[in-house]
Amino acid sequence: MGNRREFLKISLAASAGVAICGCSRSGSTAKIFDDSERNCLIAISEQIVPADEQWGGATEAGVINYIENWVGKYYPEMLPIYKKGVSAVQNASQRLYAKNFQELEFNVQTDFLKKMESGALDQQDWKEINQRDFFKEMRVRTMQGFYGPPRHGGNKDYMSYKMCGLEMPHVLGQNRY
């Protein structure tokens, strides 16, 4: 096997490898929404921050990763609100259009969310959650996921910083204007 010094070197290298692997996994987020819920949340976020000819939108920025990270790690008490909100959106969409929200055309989704924002959707689908409050929640988390620091799961590759013409901070929170 070798001497004690070689054993310690190998052990130290192995423990460093385990530590590095553990650290790299700590930034990943577990999926807490099923595929249908994720796709609905992505479609809502893409309505709030859509892509254009030059820049990507909420989808490319990874807003869904931010939302799952935010709910899964920091505010798990919000999970029932998201589940009820997505369920209400899907129920209303099915009742109105016989399709899930994410399957609707972009302009139909836009009209749906305008009604939701103003509280004009039929209340029979919104018995467990307020539609205006859920829209506000989605708007806030989408904006945070798009414009916030990438370390929280969104703003992939500093997309919004580049879009706004900002330099990436050398030290987080230390942009000098």
Image (spheres, rainbow, N blue to C red):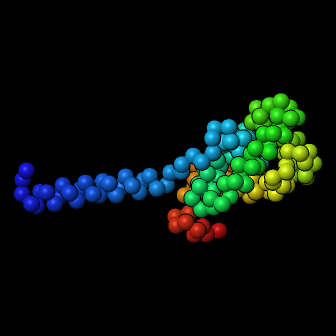
Vertical placement of residue 102 versus 16, above or below: above
Q: Position of residue 176 (x, y in %)?
A: 61, 69
* Between 170 and 148, the one nearer to me in the picture: 148
Q: Position of residue 67 (x, y in %)?
A: 64, 53
The structure residue drawn at horizontal position 52% and vertical position 67%, both measured from the top left corner, is 171
Is 79 left or right of 101, judged from the image as shown?
A: left
Instruction: Name the outermost residue toward the top.
Output: 98
* Between 156 and 93, the one nearer to me in the picture: 93
Is 25 left or right of 72, judged from the image as shown?
A: left
Q: Is residue 165 visible?
A: no
Vertical placement of residue 173 versus 65, above or below: below
Q: Quadrant of residue 19?
A: bottom left
* Between 130 and 20, the one nearer to me in the picture: 130
Q: Position of residue 142 (x, y in %)?
A: 71, 53
The structure residue drawn at horizontal position 85% and vertical position 45%, both measured from the top left corner, is 125
* Between 123 and 75, the one nearer to me in the picture: 123
The structure residue drawn at horizontal position 12% and vertical position 57%, both measured from the top left corner, is 6
Q: Quadrant of residue 151?
A: bottom right
Is 166 left or right of 135, judged from the image as shown?
A: left
Vertical placement of residue 52 versus 174, above or below: above
The structure residue drawn at horizontal position 57% and vertical position 59%, both measured from the top left corner, is 73
Q: On the rendered image, what quadrant is the C terminus found in?
A: bottom right
Is 28 left or right of 138, judged from the image as shown?
A: left
Q: Position of residue 41 (x, y in %)?
A: 71, 45
Q: Is residue 87 visible?
A: yes
Q: How many callouts does the rendering have?
A: 0
